[in-house]
Image (spheres, rainbow, N blue to C red):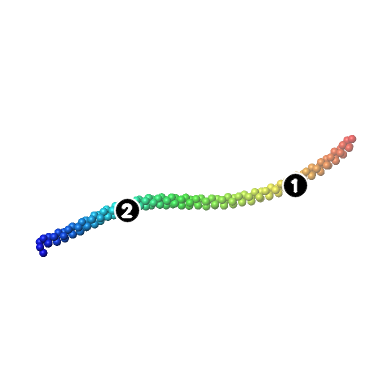
Amino acid sequence: MTDRELLEKILKKIGSMDSGMNSMESKISSMDSRMNSMESKISSMDSRMNSMESKISSMDSRMNSMESKISSMDSRMNSMESKISSMETKMTDIKAAVIFTKDIVTKIENEHGQMLGVLFDGYTQNSEKLDRIEIEVSKHEEIILKKLK
């Protein structure tokens, strides 16, 4: 092999290596753009994750607020239940007092009814007595008037 052939062969190999290097540079450039795209997507995912964390934090604070309100409502319900229980006790006492008063009123009405009956009987007897006395007085008046004439 001559020097010239050797040089041509070397040149050919260098050309082949040069085209391989160009291909590799193209692939590296493609990989670089793909890496930039991936970095952009990762950055986008990172901002979306931050947004989700913010929303979750907001939801957590809202849940805490709701728990507080539910606890407040629970204590108010307990207070209302105790007040209702107290009112039921008072209503029972009032019912007992009404029944007691009703019994006393019924007893008074019976006693007064009997007393009024007795008074009416006494009035009737007095009226009858007065009628008899009036009849007797009339008889005596007639006698006196007859004697005077």
**Rendered residue at 79%/42% (across/down):** 130
Q: Is residue 146 left or right of residue 35?
A: right
Whether residue 73 can be seen here: yes
Quarter of the image that includes the N terminus: bottom left
Quick one: label 2 or label 1, which is nearer the N terminus?
Answer: 2
Q: Is residue 107 left or right of residue 34?
A: right
Q: CA distance from mark 2 to mark 1?
A: 109 Å
Callout 1: SS? helix
Tag of residue 45: 2
Q: Vertical placement of 35 versus 145: above or below?
A: below
Discs 2/1, front: 2
On the image, the x and y values in percent for residue 38 come to: 29, 54
The quarter holding residue 131 reads top right
**Is 61 or 30 nearer to us in this picture?**
30
Callout 2: SS? helix
Tag of residue 121: 1
**Is 120 or 63 nearer to us in this picture?**
63
Q: Is residue 28 left or right of residue 115?
A: left
**Rendered residue at 55%/50% (across/down):** 90
Q: Residues within 10 Å of mark 2 (few under 14, many from 20)?
A: few
Amino acid, disc 2: Met
**Rendered residue at 20%/59% (across/down):** 20
On the image, the x and y values in percent for residue 6 come to: 12, 62
Whether residue 57 can be seen here: no
Q: Residues within 10 Å of mark 1 (few under 14, many from 20)?
A: few
On the image, the x and y values in percent for residue 7 come to: 12, 60
